[in-house]
Amino acid sequence: MAGRVTAVSRNATYSFSKPHRESVTLLAGLGVEGDVHAGETIRHQFRMTYEPDLPNLRQVHLMHEELFDELARKGFDVSAGQLGENITTRGVDLLGLPTGTLLHLGEEAVVEVTGLRNPCAKINDFRKGLLGEMFAMDPVSGEFTFKSGVMGVVRQGGVVRPQDPVEVELPPAPHRPLERV
Protein backbone atom coordinates (compact mmCIF):
# COMPACT_ATOMS: atom_id res chain seq x y z
CA MET A 1 0.00 0.00 0.00
CA ALA A 2 1.21 3.49 -0.78
CA GLY A 3 -0.37 6.87 -0.31
CA ARG A 4 0.64 10.45 0.23
CA VAL A 5 0.71 13.16 2.86
CA THR A 6 -1.84 15.88 2.11
CA ALA A 7 -1.20 18.23 5.07
CA VAL A 8 1.02 18.63 8.12
CA SER A 9 0.10 20.52 11.28
CA ARG A 10 1.48 21.31 14.72
CA ASN A 11 0.73 23.58 17.65
CA ALA A 12 2.98 24.55 20.54
CA THR A 13 0.00 25.12 22.85
CA TYR A 14 -2.98 23.00 23.84
CA SER A 15 -5.89 23.72 21.54
CA PHE A 16 -8.31 21.52 19.66
CA SER A 17 -7.12 22.36 16.13
CA LYS A 18 -3.58 22.64 14.80
CA PRO A 19 -2.51 25.12 12.11
CA HIS A 20 -1.09 23.92 8.80
CA ARG A 21 2.65 24.12 8.21
CA GLU A 22 4.83 23.87 5.12
CA SER A 23 6.63 21.03 6.87
CA VAL A 24 7.02 19.35 10.24
CA THR A 25 10.13 17.74 11.67
CA LEU A 26 9.68 14.40 13.40
CA LEU A 27 12.12 13.65 16.22
CA ALA A 28 12.89 10.01 17.06
CA GLY A 29 11.37 8.99 20.38
CA LEU A 30 9.69 12.36 20.89
CA GLY A 31 7.19 13.30 18.17
CA VAL A 32 6.63 16.47 16.17
CA GLU A 33 9.18 19.17 16.94
CA GLY A 34 7.43 22.19 18.44
CA ASP A 35 4.16 20.33 19.08
CA VAL A 36 2.63 20.32 22.55
CA HIS A 37 2.17 16.53 22.41
CA ALA A 38 5.86 15.77 21.76
CA GLY A 39 7.73 13.97 24.54
CA GLU A 40 8.88 10.62 25.85
CA THR A 41 6.10 10.45 28.44
CA ILE A 42 2.41 11.06 27.92
CA ARG A 43 1.43 14.60 26.92
CA HIS A 44 -2.33 14.19 26.59
CA GLN A 45 -3.64 17.05 28.76
CA PHE A 46 -6.22 15.02 30.70
CA ARG A 47 -4.22 11.79 31.03
CA MET A 48 -1.13 13.63 32.32
CA THR A 49 -3.03 14.36 35.54
CA TYR A 50 -3.31 10.68 36.51
CA GLU A 51 -0.73 8.83 34.35
CA PRO A 52 2.16 11.30 33.93
CA ASP A 53 4.94 8.69 33.73
CA LEU A 54 3.44 6.44 31.05
CA PRO A 55 5.32 6.16 27.75
CA ASN A 56 3.94 8.53 25.12
CA LEU A 57 2.29 6.25 22.56
CA ARG A 58 0.54 9.32 21.08
CA GLN A 59 3.54 11.29 19.79
CA VAL A 60 2.04 11.70 16.31
CA HIS A 61 -1.63 11.79 15.32
CA LEU A 62 -2.37 10.72 11.73
CA MET A 63 -5.75 11.04 10.06
CA HIS A 64 -7.04 9.88 6.69
CA GLU A 65 -8.35 12.69 4.49
CA GLU A 66 -11.07 10.35 3.21
CA LEU A 67 -12.81 10.90 6.56
CA PHE A 68 -13.34 14.56 5.64
CA ASP A 69 -14.98 13.49 2.37
CA GLU A 70 -17.33 11.20 4.32
CA LEU A 71 -18.14 13.94 6.82
CA ALA A 72 -18.84 16.45 4.04
CA ARG A 73 -21.46 14.08 2.59
CA LYS A 74 -23.14 14.23 6.01
CA GLY A 75 -23.06 18.02 6.15
CA PHE A 76 -19.92 18.57 8.26
CA ASP A 77 -17.26 20.96 6.97
CA VAL A 78 -13.97 19.65 8.36
CA SER A 79 -10.48 19.98 6.94
CA ALA A 80 -6.92 18.95 7.77
CA GLY A 81 -5.61 19.96 11.18
CA GLN A 82 -9.02 20.91 12.54
CA LEU A 83 -9.40 17.66 14.50
CA GLY A 84 -5.94 18.00 16.01
CA GLU A 85 -3.98 15.68 13.75
CA ASN A 86 -0.33 16.26 12.85
CA ILE A 87 -0.27 14.40 9.54
CA THR A 88 -3.16 14.02 7.12
CA THR A 89 -2.92 11.27 4.50
CA ARG A 90 -4.78 10.07 1.42
CA GLY A 91 -4.69 6.59 -0.07
CA VAL A 92 -3.73 4.70 3.10
CA ASP A 93 -6.28 2.68 5.08
CA LEU A 94 -4.95 3.90 8.42
CA LEU A 95 -7.78 2.35 10.43
CA GLY A 96 -7.20 -1.06 8.84
CA LEU A 97 -3.51 -1.25 9.72
CA PRO A 98 -2.30 -3.64 12.40
CA THR A 99 -0.49 -2.49 15.52
CA GLY A 100 3.23 -2.09 14.87
CA THR A 101 2.88 -1.05 11.22
CA LEU A 102 5.70 1.24 10.11
CA LEU A 103 4.77 4.27 8.02
CA HIS A 104 7.64 5.65 5.96
CA LEU A 105 6.91 9.35 5.45
CA GLY A 106 8.90 11.36 2.94
CA GLU A 107 12.58 10.64 2.54
CA GLU A 108 13.55 9.65 6.10
CA ALA A 109 10.83 9.69 8.74
CA VAL A 110 9.34 6.47 10.12
CA VAL A 111 6.33 6.33 12.47
CA GLU A 112 5.22 3.13 14.19
CA VAL A 113 1.44 2.89 14.55
CA THR A 114 0.53 2.26 18.20
CA GLY A 115 -3.28 2.41 18.15
CA LEU A 116 -6.49 4.25 17.45
CA ARG A 117 -7.18 7.78 18.60
CA ASN A 118 -9.88 7.82 21.21
CA PRO A 119 -12.24 10.65 20.20
CA CYS A 120 -13.11 13.05 23.00
CA ALA A 121 -16.18 15.16 23.76
CA LYS A 122 -14.35 18.30 22.57
CA ILE A 123 -15.20 17.17 19.04
CA ASN A 124 -18.80 18.19 19.71
CA ASP A 125 -17.60 21.61 20.91
CA PHE A 126 -15.89 22.00 17.53
CA ARG A 127 -18.95 20.87 15.51
CA LYS A 128 -22.19 19.89 17.26
CA GLY A 129 -23.04 16.25 16.52
CA LEU A 130 -19.62 15.41 15.08
CA LEU A 131 -18.61 13.07 17.91
CA GLY A 132 -21.26 10.56 16.83
CA GLU A 133 -19.65 10.40 13.39
CA MET A 134 -16.31 9.33 14.90
CA PHE A 135 -17.58 5.79 15.54
CA ALA A 136 -18.43 2.99 13.09
CA MET A 137 -20.31 -0.22 13.77
CA ASP A 138 -19.36 -3.39 11.93
CA PRO A 139 -22.68 -4.78 10.63
CA VAL A 140 -21.46 -8.39 10.89
CA SER A 141 -19.64 -8.51 14.23
CA GLY A 142 -21.52 -5.73 15.98
CA GLU A 143 -18.19 -4.34 17.17
CA PHE A 144 -17.53 -0.63 16.89
CA THR A 145 -14.34 1.20 16.05
CA PHE A 146 -13.07 4.73 16.24
CA LYS A 147 -12.70 6.64 12.97
CA SER A 148 -10.71 9.63 14.24
CA GLY A 149 -7.29 8.47 13.07
CA VAL A 150 -4.35 6.60 14.49
CA MET A 151 -1.56 7.41 16.89
CA GLY A 152 2.10 6.57 16.57
CA VAL A 153 5.63 6.99 17.87
CA VAL A 154 8.56 8.29 15.84
CA ARG A 155 11.11 5.54 15.19
CA GLN A 156 13.24 7.58 12.78
CA GLY A 157 13.21 11.35 12.49
CA GLY A 158 12.94 13.44 9.37
CA VAL A 159 11.08 16.27 7.68
CA VAL A 160 7.56 15.60 6.37
CA ARG A 161 5.79 17.80 3.82
CA PRO A 162 2.50 17.76 1.94
CA GLN A 163 2.76 15.58 -1.18
CA ASP A 164 5.41 13.33 0.41
CA PRO A 165 4.84 9.62 -0.21
CA VAL A 166 3.61 7.30 2.53
CA GLU A 167 4.92 3.75 2.29
CA VAL A 168 3.36 1.08 4.51
CA GLU A 169 5.49 -1.69 6.05
CA LEU A 170 3.37 -4.30 7.80
CA PRO A 171 4.77 -6.07 10.87
CA PRO A 172 5.38 -9.83 10.84
CA ALA A 173 2.26 -11.97 11.20
CA PRO A 174 0.21 -12.67 13.18
CA HIS A 175 -1.14 -9.13 13.06
CA ARG A 176 -2.75 -7.48 16.09
CA PRO A 177 -5.70 -5.18 15.40
CA LEU A 178 -5.50 -1.58 16.54
CA GLU A 179 -6.91 -0.72 19.93
CA ARG A 180 -7.38 2.76 21.38
CA VAL A 181 -4.40 4.35 23.06
Image (tube, rainbow, N blue to C red):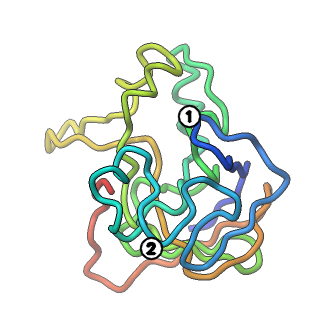
Whether pointer 1 and pointer 2 mark residues with C-beta atoms closer than 8 Å, the reply is: no
Closer to the eye: label 1 or 2:
1
Please tell me which residue is depicted at 66% across the width and 32% down the height of the picture: 79
Cα separation, mark 1 vs mark 2, equals 27 Å
Residue 105: percent from left, percent from top? 67, 70
Which quadrant holds the C terminus? bottom left
Q: Residues within 10 Å of mark 1 (few under 14, many from 20)?
A: some
* 146 horizontally vs 20: left or right: left
Residue 101's label in the rendered image is 2
Specify the quadrant that holds the N terminus. Answer: bottom right
Say which mark, if any, is on residue 5.
none
Q: Residue pushed farthest right?
A: 22
Say left or right for 30 vs 56: right
Q: Is residue 160 above or below residue 123?
A: below
The residue tagged 1 is 16
- Disc 1 on helix, strand or loop? loop
Q: Mark yes or no: residue 45 visible.
A: yes
For marks 1 and 2 on the same chain, the one whose residue lies earlier in the sequence: 1
Q: Which corner quadrant of the image does residue 62 belong to?
A: bottom right
- What amino acid does circle 1 point to? Phe
Inspect this view and state whether residue 90 appears: no
- The secondary element bearing badge 2 is classed as loop
Residue 59, position in %: x, y? 52, 63
Residue 129 on image: x %, y %: 41, 15
Say which residue appears at 65% left-offset and 55% top-offset: 35
How dense is the environment of label 2, judged by Cα within 10 Å: few (below 14), some, or many (20 and up)? many
The furthest residue to the left: 141
Instruction: Determine whether 150 is above or below 140 in the image.
Output: below
Amino acid type at image mark 2: Thr
Residue 161 horizontal/vertical position (percent): 79, 60
What residue sits 81% from the left and 58% below the top? 23
